Image (tube, rainbow, N blue to C red):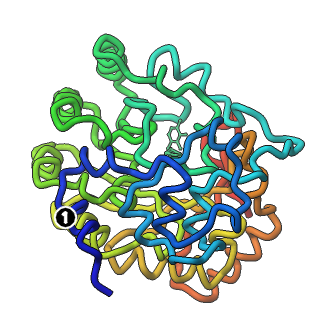
Amino acid sequence: MSEPQSEIRHFSKNWQQQLAEAFNNLEDLCRYLNLSPNELPVSNAAAENFPLRVPLSFAACIEKGNPHDPLLRQVLPVNEELIVYPGFSHDPVGDLASVSQTGVLHKYQGRVLLINTGSCAINCRYCFRRNFPYGELQLSKQKEEAAIQAIQNDTDISEVILSGGDPLLLSDSRLTRLIRQLDGIGHVRRIRIHTRLPIVLPARITDDLINTLKLSPKQLIVITHCNHANEINERVITACTLLKNSGITLFNQAVLLKGVNDNAKILTALSERLFDLGIIPYYLHLLDKATGTGHFEVSETEALTLIRQLQTALPGYLVPKLVKEQAGAASKQAVF
Ligand SMILES: *Cc1c(COP(=O)(O)O)cnc(C)c1O
Ligand code: SF4
């Protein structure tokens, strides 16, 4: 199926413009998807808590006219978000208090996580970041310098993870400055970037970005975030191929989400499709129990059943590790 003229025009623009034109209201998104807001369980209150935000590249992967589409479910503000579930809280992982001071999160041995920006190109309804004034987490130039200094001073740190929000929303100049500074720290062996942009805003993977990454003498790792094979379109393939061909190691993390990918066939297809692009499935996360996300929860028992099904359907290297995040633990917790 060929794309309409308006989409061709949109996708010929640069990534900043594409981002500025992302859907930010329900009416526009519904019109684009040939859906009536009346046939969807949408909630304005939910959208006020955490706004709707969907780039066209991702919206184009949603099946038109299907109110139950698994990609639509990830981005649509719905009534279920207002339900209060026991055990769900605002900061289930317990990270935010510590990170907001410095922008540096040093929880695990040898690895630090740098929160460079609180923004994302897409607002995923299941995200724990939905409950925070993440704008406050912007790493100012001063904080960034302090963070670099702290990494410089701690020779135990061998890996720096750029996270967020989405670190690839930083401008090329800021990103280049940051990476060049890390390049200068001898004990840092690896720079890892956690980003959903190759999937939801593939135009971000520009030649300039690739050149910045390629110039680094460190091992570069990009961890994408893709939950369903339908999220991978031609533009995503192009972006991931650019990353892959520049020598970057690619992994994917997904979140196990009810009504999205809680099915062995769907998870199998996701692993196969990712590997087609040279991406290795890394983690399958159990949901962080953040307020407003309870309707996405898949129980540990169900999750384990799914993993066992994947183990019979796929080679071992295409079975992601099932993990959960536990406040205070020294690593992600494997679920057996
Ligand atoms: C997830 C996470 C990491 C990375 O963990 P890996 O198991 O190495 O992928 C590092 N720091 C923090 C704070 C994390 O949440
Ligand atoms: S891209 Fe990641 S951090 Fe951003 S809203 Fe989605 S899940 Fe949350």
Q: Mark 1 points at which residue?
A: 242
In x, y percent, where is residue 161?
Answer: 39, 39
Which is more toward the observer, 184 or 19? 19
In x, y percent, where is residue 127?
Answer: 60, 46
Q: Quadrant of residue 94?
A: top right
- Is disc 1's CB within 8 Å of ligand 2? no
Mark 1: give few (<14), some (14-19) or many (20+) Cα within 10 Å: some
Instruction: Using the image, determine if residue 271 lies above or below residue 221.
Output: below
Q: In which quarter of the image is the C terminus?
A: bottom right
Tell me which residue sits at (13%, 44%) in the image: 212
Tell me which residue sits at (54%, 85%) in the image: 314
In x, y percent, where is residue 130?
Answer: 61, 38
- Image position of 31 (left or right of 97): left
Task: Give the amino acid type for the residue marked by disc 1 in the picture.
Answer: Leu
- Residue farthest toward the right in the current orientation of the protein: 86
Work out whether residue 317 can be spotted: no
Instruction: Using the image, determine if residue 98 lies above or below residue 163.
Output: above
Instruction: Using the image, determine if residue 85 lies above or below residue 198.
Output: above
Mark 1 residue element = helix
Which is more toward the observer, 312 or 246? 246
Q: In which quarter of the image is residue 235?
A: bottom left
Tell me which residue sits at (52%, 71%) in the image: 228
Q: In which quarter of the image is residue 334?
A: bottom right
Which is more toward the observer, 29 or 233? 29
- Image position of 21 (left or right of 128): left
Work out whether residue 65 can be spotted: yes
Q: Quadrant of the N terminus?
A: bottom left
In x, y percent, where is residue 91?
Answer: 69, 31
